[in-house]
Amino acid sequence: MLIENKVQIKAIKTGKYMAGKVNGTVMFTEGHFIVYIEEKDCLIDISKIKEFPKDRMEKYSADKIEKLLKPVKLKEEALILTGKTARLFENKETGDKIWLNNKYVKMFDGCKCHSVEIEDGIKDVVFTRYGKVVGLVLPLKPPGD
């Protein structure tokens, strides 16, 4: 099952998600990741879910981040941290390294990976499928920082 469907089910079941709509794209988040769904493909009434703050929706809108994408590659490196596994993404051109919780990486299995810098110095990983933004995952604090 695609993450776009799973997140809608979890949003209904748990009540721990926020949702909002920007430019025809519905965004779901629980704080560590965002899932993007075209409005026509959204199956639930997002007015019944806690509202995603407008300023954050605009900042992380799919239209805005599509213009900022840079290719990154998932490396064969991982770290076992307390209660989680961290996976490394690297941009060969810039040398940027981004660590993500493997739990969120697995959610976007089969997607292409990109980095994006939305806030100064913080690089997130964006996942695309067929050229469309599907998700964004916030990074873990780099080991050793």
Image: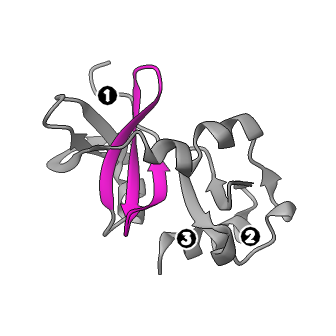
Residue 120 spot, x, y in % from top left: 46, 20
Residue pictured at 38% horizontal, 63% vertical: 131
Q: Residues within 10 Å of mark 1 (few under 14, many from 20)?
A: few
Q: Residues within 10 Å of mark 3 (few under 14, many from 20)?
A: many
Q: Position of residue 19 (x, y in %)?
A: 72, 55
Q: Which residue is mark 2?
A: 12
Is residue 83 at least partly visible in the picture? no
Q: Is residue 104 above or below residue 116?
A: below
Is residue 34 found left or right of 113 in the rendered image?
right
The color scheme shown is: one colour
Q: Which mark is residue 142?
A: 1
User: In the rendered structure, which amino acid carries the disc numbered 3?
Assistant: Glu
Q: Quadrant of residue 107?
A: bottom left
Give left or right: position of 21 versus 142.
right
Magenta: main secondary structure equals strand
Task: State the separation of the CA atoms marked 3 and 2.
Answer: 13 Å
Which region shows up in magenta? 112-136
Question: What separation in Å lies between label 1 and label 3 (alpha carbons)?
Answer: 28 Å
- Indicate which disc, 3 or 2, sits on the residue closer to the N terminus: 3
Asked if residue 67 shows in the view, the reply is: yes
For residue 108, what is the image quadrant? bottom left
Mark closer to the observer (1, 3): 3
* Numbered disc 2: secondary structure: helix
Say which residue appears at 47% left-offset and 76% top-offset: 2
Callout 1 amino acid: Pro
Q: Is residue 122 located in the magenta-colored stretch of the structure?
A: yes
- Helix, strand or loop status at disc 1: loop
Residue that carries the numbered disc 3 in the rendered image? 4
